[in-house]
Amino acid sequence: MRRANAALAELSSPCPFAAFGTAIVNHTAGGLGELVCIGINSNSLHGDPTLHGEIAAIQNCSKVLTDPAGPYKLSPGDAISAFKQLSLYTNAESCPMCASAVRWAGFREYIYGTSIKALIDNGWGQISISSKEIFRQSSALSSNTSFIPGILTNETNPLFFWQFDVNATCPTGCSRNLDYNVLGGKLNRGMSVIDSVEILLGRSLTDAEYGKAAVLGWCIELFQAFCLVSDDVMDKCHVRRTQPCWYRLPHVRLIAVNDACMLRSAIFHLLKKCFRQETYYVDVLELFHDVSFNTDMGQLVDLITASEDTVDLSKFSLERHRKIVVFKTAYYSFYLPVALAMRFTGILDSDPATAIRPYRVALSILIPLGEYFQVQDDWLDYAGTVEQIGKVGTDIIDNKCSWCINTALALANPEQRAILDANYGGKGRGQEWKVKKVFEEVGIAEEYAKYEDDAFRRITGLIEIIPEVTKVGELKREVFVTFLQKIHKRLM
């Protein structure tokens, strides 16, 4: 039975959705028996609706038994007779079609794990006729097949119970898209929605308010996961948050493209379920659509600017870096959480009392904040320690269009520029060190210190444009001050 389960990983992946595996064994060979062939549910692979695991295994056995170059070299007639000496193990009870095939083949033994009833009880569409009934109705056949049910169900059941039950444990070697890609981060974007709502309302939230604000926060985290899964595929990344990227898992591969789409689609499913009756529902939908469009544009600019396969620093510039940062990061990481909190608390597009347009003001502050945050990330990738940032910085060898390289390009003399052109994005011995040496020579640390001080003054000035208010339904300085305090001079 364990060999039937192992056939899944051998022929497909550790946890395919239709995890039906079969092993056919010759127990007359002595010992634990001789494995003759295996098969798994392959109907979607070959476009054959009858190609269930048992049928696939029987067909594979016919090929093995009659192969002139194989170990058995049987004639077709002898191969048919040989099935009467073989035992068929399948990790789930055979459907009526497959159970009939088992009886027509005349197997010596038929052994299964998970029952049809258990499959139906856990959401699987099945024809509700047990294999025992098929065996009872086939008594006129000349062969007799031993019927052995319910073997190792503690190991076979998990293969079939996770698909339609979110609370079921995943089989060994499998992970859920949501668990693997949405959880595990810092969740700062999602929590920022809740924090901003509390500041704007000026009080603690009720359970109902917290629940709805949390849904909006999780929608941002879903969007973040969508971006990361997609980005990892496009950038051919290997590791994300100290674990292999989703698309690199054996049971995922390019299914990750569809999984990314599912993560994004889940946002709009949640919004419809939880906010359709709210007056701001359309505003929230438009926010996500607009931010998604901007993020896609930023990703496109990044991809055509900094390909890991082809290094061309003539495409780099501080202005190009700013466009990538603003569109790819700032809109969804900084503007979206606050704008959602503003819609949730009833802040209008314009304030008749002050003539302020709150969303434009928020955007004018949060986009520079997002840019400042990303420049910090770029700097820490170059100058931060593993203890600070939890990883070894790879922007230089990965040909990233970061603030550091663009600033160095703006300051470098011809000799230094030649060194950068020859070594940036290179993975050879000493190439990264040569780039860092140029960074030191042009005074990148001093430039960063000046940038950070200037960014802080600039953003503080923008925040002070907002009037000091205490009324609910009006924009508050504290929202933006809180953001700025979190990131100013951060070291991780």
Image: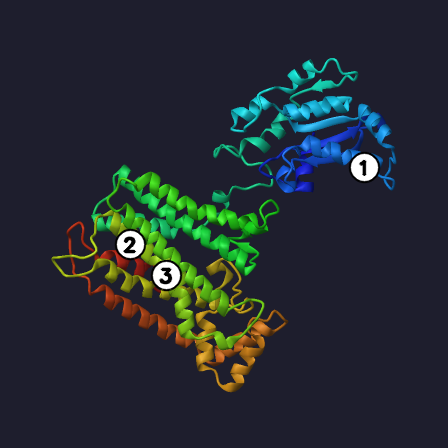
Compared across the picture, whether 52 is left or right of 272 comes to right
Disc on the earlier residue, 3 or 1: 1
Q: Is residue 2 visible?
A: no
| CA gap, disc 2 and disc 3 | 13 Å
Q: Give the mark toward the camera: 1 or 2.
A: 1
Comes first in the chain, label 1 or label 2: 1
Q: Residue at x 46, y 72 (%)?
A: 404
Colour logic: rainbow
Q: Quadrant of residue 39?
A: top right
Reading the image, the residue beneath label 2 is 339
Instruction: Give residue 330's mark.
Output: 3
Residue drawn 26% across the image and 56% down it: 479
Residue 13 location (% of width, % of height): 63, 42
Location of residue 10 with respect to 410 vertically, above or below: above
**Given this view, does label 3 or label 1 mark the residue nearer the observer?**
1
Disc 1 target residue:
64
Q: Residue at x 66, y 20 (%)?
A: 149
Q: Is residue 49 above or below residue 229?
A: above
**What amino acid does circle 2 point to?**
Ala
Rendering coords of residue 199 (x, y %): 24, 51
Residue type of the residue flagged with mark 1 = Val
Q: Which is more toward the observer, 220 or 469?
A: 220
Residue 47's place in the image compared with 316, above or below, is above
**Mark 3: amino acid:** Ala
Horizontal relation, residue 117 to residue 325: left or right: right
